[in-house]
Amino acid sequence: IQLSFIINFILQINRLLGQNVLLNYLRGKYQQPLEEELIFMFLDLKSSTTIAEKLGLFKNHEFLNDFFHDMTDPILEYKGTIYQYVGDEVVLTWKPEDGIEYNNCINLFFAIQNKILLKKEYYLERYGVYPEFKAGIHIGPVITGEMGEIKKDIVYHGDTINTAARIQAECNNYKKRVLISEELNNELDISGNYNVESMGNIILRGKERELELFAVEEKR
């Protein structure tokens, strides 16, 4: 009984902290800050303020929880890792080899979208709305390390994260569901399954250097 309790406790802690976080703590992998390259996806719910006002606190919480739950299988299938939830936004990461392989970082977005469309009637019956979302994706270097004292966490720092967030914010301006950076586009081979359209060079908010963005859509 004690062994099963310990195993269950460890599994629950691992779920609470996130994928592989507990294992990395125990290994001491990030006790010393480490520079590494990662892919970041900032996935954000559309019209979240309007939805929250319509549903109220508790119902909106259930709505978000259902949405996040429905992401689980696609995230595991396409080798993504949940870094954090920020309100109605999810930040996902990949090691480059995992995200670039078979275009996993792109496939994930559309897999989530298709999963939600299959459950559209459920959401409409229960909440009167269904999740629509957008994403910005970027690749680059970050510093990864443990942070904090009474509450420790493994965190990422670097311009790559800010850039990914800014790319996501441009989705509304261009009326696109997925925008990726030129750096990521250069690493992927997605023209076979997706339509890729250049949005031209822009200067993201708070940046000085121009960056070319690309919109990605499934081929019909």
Image (cartoon, grey):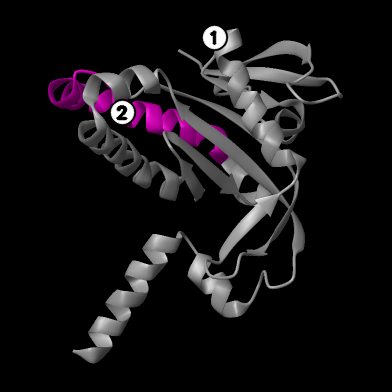
Residue 188, visible in the rendered structure: no
Frontmost residue, 11 versus 188: 11
Q: Nearer the viewer, residue 4 or 143?
A: 143
Quarter of the image where the N terminus is located: bottom left
In the image, is residue 156 part of the stretch drawn in magenta?
no
Read off the residue under disc 1. 175
In the image, is residue 110 part of the stretch drawn in magenta? yes
2 or 1: tag closer to the N-terminus: 2
Q: Residue at point 59% right, 48% down?
A: 94
What secondary structure is marked by label 1?
loop
Q: Which mark is residue 116?
A: 2
Q: Residue furthest front?
A: 150
Q: Which mark is residue 89?
A: none
Q: Residue at x 66, y 72 (%)?
A: 29
Location of residue 8 with respect to 171 vertically, above or below: below
Callout 1, which amino acid?
Lys
Q: CA distance from mark 2 to mark 1?
A: 20 Å
How far from the left and from the top, in percent, is residue 108? 48, 36
Q: Quadrant of residue 8?
A: bottom left
Residue furthest out toward the right: 209
Tag 1: Cα neighbours inside 10 Å, few (<14), some, or many (≥20)? few
Q: Which stretch appears magenta? A: 103-130
Q: Between residue 208 and residue 10, name the one nearer to us.
A: 208
**Residue drawn at (24%, 84%) of the image:** 4
